[in-house]
Image (cartoon, grey):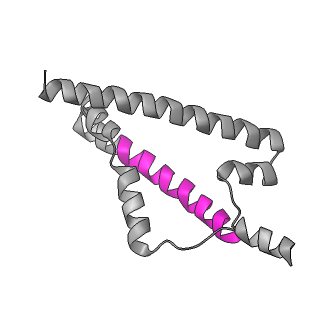
């Protein structure tokens, strides 16, 4: 009985409502990088090239996240996408993906702090 109780404590809890998921999606899509780097993309590729680039990458991300959602529906486990790589491909790939994901967020936090400092410097020199 206590073993079953321990397993239920580590199971995936499904308490998110539709509005929670919508706000997470909006918050993930609109970030500081969208406002600060879109000018560089328009400068380098022009308005049409930037629009095409964003559209192509958006379609790729849509299919990637759809497949990740299918895997999460098929096999709801605690952990991130590296858990699926460990289970379905190889443990070393899951390990590498986990460290790459960590490194990605370290760089993202540093970039967001830098961009926030640039925005503050623009408004309050």
Instruction: Say if 26 sits above or below 96 in the image.
Output: below
Name the residue at the front extreme. Answer: 2
Evaluate whether residue 43 shows in this view: no
Q: Residue at x 37, y 41 (%)?
A: 53
**Which quadrant holds the C terminus?**
top left
Q: Magenta stretch: residue 73 in it?
A: yes
Instruction: Say if 66 sits above or below 121 in the image.
Output: below
Task: Residue 91: give x, y in percent of width and height.
Answer: 82, 44
Q: Residue 12: which quarter of the image?
A: bottom right
Q: Compare residues 59 and 72 and report the one nearer the observer.
A: 72
Q: Residue at x 26, y 40 (%)?
A: 48
Q: Is residue 58 left or right of residue 83?
A: left
Q: Is residue 66 left or right of residue 37?
A: right
Task: Residue 86: give x, y in percent of width and height.
Answer: 78, 48
Q: Residue 17: which quarter of the image?
A: bottom left
Task: Residue 74: give x, y in percent of width and height.
Answer: 70, 70
Evaluate whether residue 34 shows in this view: yes
Task: Residue 96: give x, y in percent of width and height.
Answer: 72, 36
Q: Residue at x 39, y 66 (%)?
A: 22
Q: Please provide the residue range marked out in magenta.
A: 53-74
Q: Is residue 47 left or right of residue 12?
A: left
Q: Residue at x 78, y 69 (%)?
A: 7
- Prevalent SS, magenta region: helix
**Which quadrant holds the N terminus?**
bottom right
């Amino acid at each position: 009985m206590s073993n079953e109780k321990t397993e239920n404590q580590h199971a995936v809890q499904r308490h998110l409502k539709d509005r929670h998921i919508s706000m997470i999606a909006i918050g993930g899509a609109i970030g500081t990088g969208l406002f600060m780097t879109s000018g560089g993309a328009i400068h380098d590729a022009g308005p049409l090239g930037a629009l095409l680039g964003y559209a192509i990458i958006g379609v790729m991300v849509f299919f990637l996240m759809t497949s990740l959602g299918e895997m999460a529906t098929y096999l709801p486990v605690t952990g991130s996408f590296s858990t699926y790589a460990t289970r379905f491909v190889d443990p070393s790939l899951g390990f590498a993906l986990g460290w790459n994901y960590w490194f990605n967020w370290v760089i993202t936090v540093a970039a967001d702090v830098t961009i926030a400092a640039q925005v503050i410097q623009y408004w309050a020199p």
